[in-house]
Amino acid sequence: MGRVITIAAAQLGPVPRAEQRGPVVARMVALMERAARVRATLVVFPELALTSFFPRWAIDDDAELDNFFEASMPGPETQPLFAAARRLGLGLCFGYGELANRAGRLQRFNSSALVGHEGGLIGHYRKVHLPGDREPQPGFEYQHLEKRYFESGDMGFPVWRAFGGVVGMLICNDRRWPEAWRVLGLQGVELVLVGYNTPLRNPEAPEHDPLVRFQHRLVMQAGAYQNATWAVAVAKGGVEEGQPMLADTLIVAPSGEIVAYSKTQGDELVVAECDLDRTQSYKTTIFDFAAHRKPQAYSRITECTGAVPPP
Amino acid sequence: MGRVITIAAAQLGPVPRAEQRGPVVARMVALMERAARVRATLVVFPELALTSFFPRWAIDDDAELDNFFEASMPGPETQPLFAAARRLGLGLCFGYGELANRAGRLQRFNSSALVGHEGGLIGHYRKVHLPGDREPQPGFEYQHLEKRYFESGDMGFPVWRAFGGVVGMLICNDRRWPEAWRVLGLQGVELVLVGYNTPLRNPEAPEHDPLVRFQHRLVMQAGAYQNATWAVAVAKGGVEEGQPMLADTLIVAPSGEIVAYSKTQGDELVVAECDLDRTQSYKTTIFDFAAHRKPQAYSRITECTGAVPPP
């Protein structure tokens, strides 16, 4: 019974800085083929799956920077992913650098694509919560320049009817922000797909480093529970260009429980059967939003950006 | 260095239905005296600390219902708590049923009081998120009639400067709602005091019963971390009038880590030294709201009450 789908979270190991699309796409197609063998409905890849996590470097040359972006989706180099989705009858989600052209103005976004099992683009999401800095920080071994390379997403937090349910996407740092989850929850989301690249060391606050895995799990589990949704978090893991990254790919139930997680730091498929009807026992009781929410008490959330302590 | 305060979370065991205020207040004063001996700055009691958790019963008689409420705060029976705070130099927080009179109209709220170490009322909070039902549910061994007995709080989520920091309060079910935490976070909160009465069995959704403790910890830890605040959750535990209640009183750091928790189901003091300056390493980096929040993407949170799935 229920609306059971099999989800394959496809963790990727490191991608070198100089890697071309071909070898990465081949690794992704190999994981899709393994996902098809376990009869997955959907395979989910990490944030910026096609390249190295380039915001760790200060890159001044525009042509070099553009190498990390896709000017069309699908494009000539990503077409094999769409073809594999069609051939294998698999849904697909993956992150990429999006180079958009709005009326002649180039825009760069940190995006993720959702592809149906017939190989067509269902939609895409542009990351809203960009962490890090606009300017390189002196003395940091690795930078985190997402605010430099990307604009904040301008599409809000859309959902789509897909794979028998209501599906939304978040990217990396978005998962730490309960507002992002709640906007999806208010659209009845049943499955949230989250790709990430999370370094194990943060030079801005090294005292947080021992807690990276704990805090990652905490926000994924809370976001799933408080919005009564399945959630999938998919890592780029391993040591990428010398920088150690959190792996810990997760599949989380609407109860907040982790039902599957990765055991390695590299390319790995994490699979779980997910009954989308399991969202209902929370959506109709403790998290029946219509019965219990009080928006008139929440106005600061949309009226304020920063914290304003009392005088 | 830092702004270190010692917090004593004063868990209470069961309070019988017929108990008068005197014996409960005496138990609370005894815990305050123990808190003073460990040089606590502040002692925190549970939701509806002065009485049994009466929303478990359908009570039709108004006079009987009024017995569970306080018409003034302090009143003759609660004055000893304020006197003990003054005598011991202890701050104090406790939950109570508030009977308010607004221009001749009686209103009932599920409230908590914040008292300074000079024994004066600093302020009070009225619970916003009332769980449960308006009407008794047939076949339930215990009811949960908070929506029947209380109005939703009409004061929002205030904070106060107290005990060297910025302090807010939530009550029980409020802790499951990230909006409540965020409104406090947007006021720079550094310490959130949460009293609760959480039954271990929920006849509305018995499939959630094995997860009561896990989900309680999850929301407390996520609320603390995502708002970079200390948080204290204080239970009424044990088997009260035949109904088993979650104990698991907690003190949670701004990292999301639990630093202290109760070991019994009864009257127990859980103590931790809390450096309010530890909030800063999160408030100024990953949760620097001014740098990272995007309110224009959050409009559904205040525009919608219930979830609206796509067509």
Image (spheres, coloured by chain):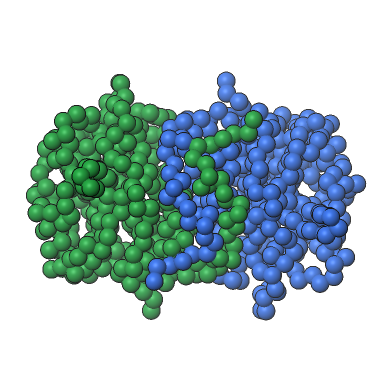
Chain colours: A blue, B green
In the picture, the quarter occupied by the N terminus of chain A is: top right
**Front in this rendered view, residue B5 or B77:** B77
Up the image or down, A309 lies above or below B175; here it is: below
Residue at x-position 23% and y-position 47%: B103
Residue B243 shows up from this direction = yes
Q: Position of residue A133 (x, y in %)?
A: 66, 69
**In the displayed structure image, the side of residue A160 where residue B96 appears, left or right:** left
Residue at x-position 79% and y-position 44%: A28
Q: Position of residue B130 (x, y in %)?
A: 35, 41
Q: Position of residue A283 (x, y in %)?
A: 49, 33
Number of numbered markers = 0
**In the displayed structure image, the side of residue A158 where residue A121 appears, left or right:** right
Q: Position of residue B280 (x, y in %)?
A: 47, 70
In the picture, the quarter occupied by the C terminus of chain A is: bottom left
Residue at x-position 11% and y-position 37%: B18
Up the image or down, A77 lies above or below B206; here it is: below
Residue at x-position 25% and y-position 50%: B95
